[in-house]
Amino acid sequence: MMPETDKLSMSALIKGAETAFLSGRHRKQADVEAAVGIFLELLRGFEVLDVPEPCVTVFGSARVREGDPAYDQARQLGRRLAETGFTVMTGGGPGVMEAANRGAKEGGGRSLGCNIRLPEEQEPNKYLDHFVEFDHFFVRKLMLIRYSCSFVVMPGGFGTMDEGFEVATLIQSGKLKNFPVVTMGTSFWEPIRGFLRGEVTERELIGQHDLDVAKLTDDVEEAIGWILAGLEGSENGPPSPAGTSAGLPSGT
């Protein structure tokens, strides 16, 4: 059961804040008030998501259900990441996110979520140890990246692609360490990678080496191996097996 304190959201003070913030030009006072709300969201994320274990973020669609290959693969991945000693973080919603969090719990690891408040009221999934709710997509995305040392991008729509390309852009521009990235679901990602290797690379809009950042695979063990190899010798890993790391203080 999730602690009651994790169900609180400072952003609830300004519900609908991102919609208002992006609705056009405002008075400077309104922008300052929005900045305060954004700062409160950042503080809440810092408070809840700073965990002792290395963390892997799994991105993916909220729309798949149990029995879908992507759901089953994410669940297996979450379990193996936890067994290897990683905390698993997702966007905290249903679908692939739920599956990865579920697997993490089954593997005895820590399961985190960064949920987003939407008009459709996306609810946090039930497999989270701790979660934070955000009004601003960009704050949520920052937190999903800030606390992780590796990223797995599974099939998804605009949001998933935005998150995956954000990570790629940060690595390409040197803003983010060259942390290991895995794309899972070869039949889904291969056409996109083909477009990038073809039109985009041929026009020299990106370099060929930019595409070598991510490992494309359908094999969970290969994904785990890529992550561990990419972190070997760094302060972020390889981690200790699940169950040997310190826990968060009670009530967080």
Image (tube, helix red, strand yellow):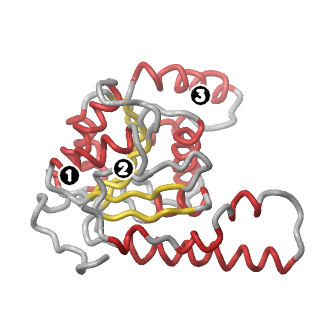
Which residue appears at 11% of the width and 58% of the height?
241
Residue neighbourhood size for the residue with mark 2, other residues' Cα within 10 Å, grouped as few (<14), some (14–19), many (≥20):
some
Residue that mark 1 sits on:
105
Of label 2 and label 3, which has the lower sequence position? 2
| Mark 3, secondary structure of its residue | helix
Residue neighbourhood size for the residue with mark 1, other residues' Cα within 10 Å, grouped as few (<14), some (14–19), many (≥20):
many
Q: Position of residue 139 (x, y in %)?
A: 57, 63
Which residue appears at 19% of the width and 61% of the height?
239
**Amino acid type assigned to the residue bearing label 1 in the image:** Lys
* Residue 185 figure quarter: top left
Q: Position of residue 2 (x, y in %)?
A: 29, 64
Viewer-proximal residue, 115 or 169?
115
| Mark 1, secondary structure of its residue | helix
Tag shown at residue 125: 2
Which residue appears at 33% of the width and 32% of the height?
71
Residue that mark 3 sits on:
196
